[in-house]
Amino acid sequence: MIRCIRRAAAFCLLLLVALLVNAARVQLFEADELDDNPANRRSSIARYDQPRGNILVGDRPVTGNKETGEQLSFERTYLHGPLYAPVTGYASQTYGTTLIENAEDDVLSGTDSLLAPLPFWNEFTRGRQPGGDVVTTIKASMQQAAYEGLRGRRGAVAALDPSTGAILALVSTPSYDPERLSGTGAAVTDAWARLNAAKSLPMLNRAIRQTYPPGSTFKIVTAAAALDSRAVTDADAATDTPSPYVLPGTQTTLPNEARGCENASLADAIRVSCNTVMAHLGVEVGLDGMVETAEKFGFNDTGLRIPSGVARSNFDTDMSEDQVALSSIGQFNTTATPLQMAMVASAVANGGDLRRPHLVDRVTTNTGDTVRQQGSESYERPMNPATAVQLQRMMVEVVENGTGSNAAIDGVKVGGKTGTAQHGVDNSGLPYAWFISWAQAPDSGRPAVAVAVVVEDAAADRADISGGGSAAPIARAVMEAALEE
């Protein structure tokens, strides 16, 4: 009898050990998989059991939370949702997160270890702290000026502080209200379907996720390459460029919209936007030199984050000479995001030093204690300081005596470059209007802002849409708001 009891006890002990081993196995090796299983609602319930941290513009939150009275207790709200949607993105109980809501999700949801009172606290407790706040670099007045300037037309604006890389405005229109996607149920599903079916693509962040042929705004990159490579040693000297210009190795002629481009100097070619001179100079620089300069400005960078990912702006690395010529005036396969072209203007304004663009200034606990500060970082030096000085002078001439006069601000040093980018089969589509610019107050030793504007205005006549006519006034409004800050 005692022997049977001993055997039964040993068997029970073996079963207990087996249970403990299995529990340890589940906790150590399968916990993450079980947490991520769509059938497990525990993580969702825990995620929405407390208010989400806020995203701030200046010292004011542009997000909030409301109690639902349901199993998922808190739902995201947005103040001026369409205005800030290209910055915040959405946080949806049904469709997940995008943009800052996604990139800073650990902070906003309270799981980031930076928010914990002790190192590894969250890892040991498998808990979360009250959601932290994310303070953006956006200036409310500039965001509003850009949004109102676009007036709902398809387009985008990106504005940078050239000295720091801080993103001061990031607008994409037409926009949408992310609060319509916050919760669950039929209304959210219907809103999602309508937004995704809309031909105007309101959820597309055109400022950082859409690329366009940059057209003549890219001529600033070509000019920098020409000066740095010594293909041009005197920006005011005549170039040996016929008009029209025959693309190398072809019988195709490249015309000019502007007059006086035959043998025009680099400075005049920038001022009146001569295709022939800039295409010829791109060929003179050569493929390798053009690629090197373009990449220093940020083209072909697949890893740029602000902290959300930015679409890759393209400059082909394998081209024939005629393709180099077209690429050098922002056509062929050359494409850029509005943020990328703001980076081009920023590098010129900042003396050739391009600062890394960033959208988050700092991260704080829910009580306001800073736990992470974003400093200014150098991205690249795409041109020599002397070249930047020459390009500043040329861009000022564009505004004072050239195609960018609509961007002029009394008493302020403003540099700009217009662009009208062809697209579509055989260039049949209405061209995009571009304008890049920068402004510096007379009593300041550094530039206040660099701006890029693109307008896709399918309703405009071809003769009416131009960088100077459609995009420059928007850039001027944004620069004026920056100067008032």
Image (spheres, rainbow, N blue to C red):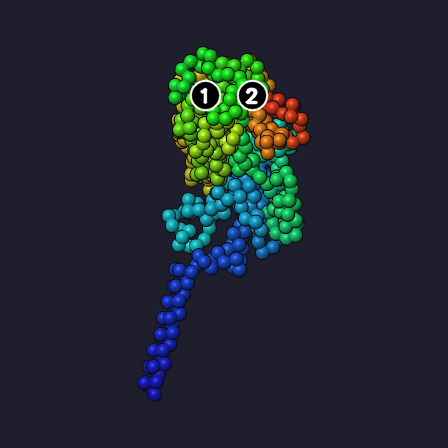
Mark 1 lies on residue = 281
Kind of residue at badge 1? Leu
- Cα separation, mark 2 vs mark 1, equals 15 Å
Residue 446 lies in what quarter of the image?
A: top left
Would you place residue 24 above or below residue 445 in this image? below
Identify the mark at residue 255; answer none if there is no mark: 2
Badge 1 local density, few (<14 within 10 Å), some, or many (20+)? Answer: many
- Quadrant of image for the N terminus: bottom left
Q: Is residue 61 left or right of residue 282?
A: right
Residue 347 lies in what quarter of the image?
A: top left
Residue visible at 51% across and 20% down in the picture:
245
User: Tag 1 or tag 2, which sits nearer the N-term?
Assistant: 2
Q: Dot 1 lies on which element?
A: helix
Whole-percent x, y for residue 244 in the image = 54, 19
Kind of residue at badge 2? Pro
Residue visible at 44% across and 24% down in the picture:
283
Whole-percent x, y for residue 416 in the image = 53, 20
Residue visible at 40% across and 52% down in the picture:
123
Answer whether residue 239 is visible to the viewer in this image.
yes
Identify the mark at residue 65; answer none if there is no mark: none
Whole-percent x, y for residue 472 in the image = 58, 23
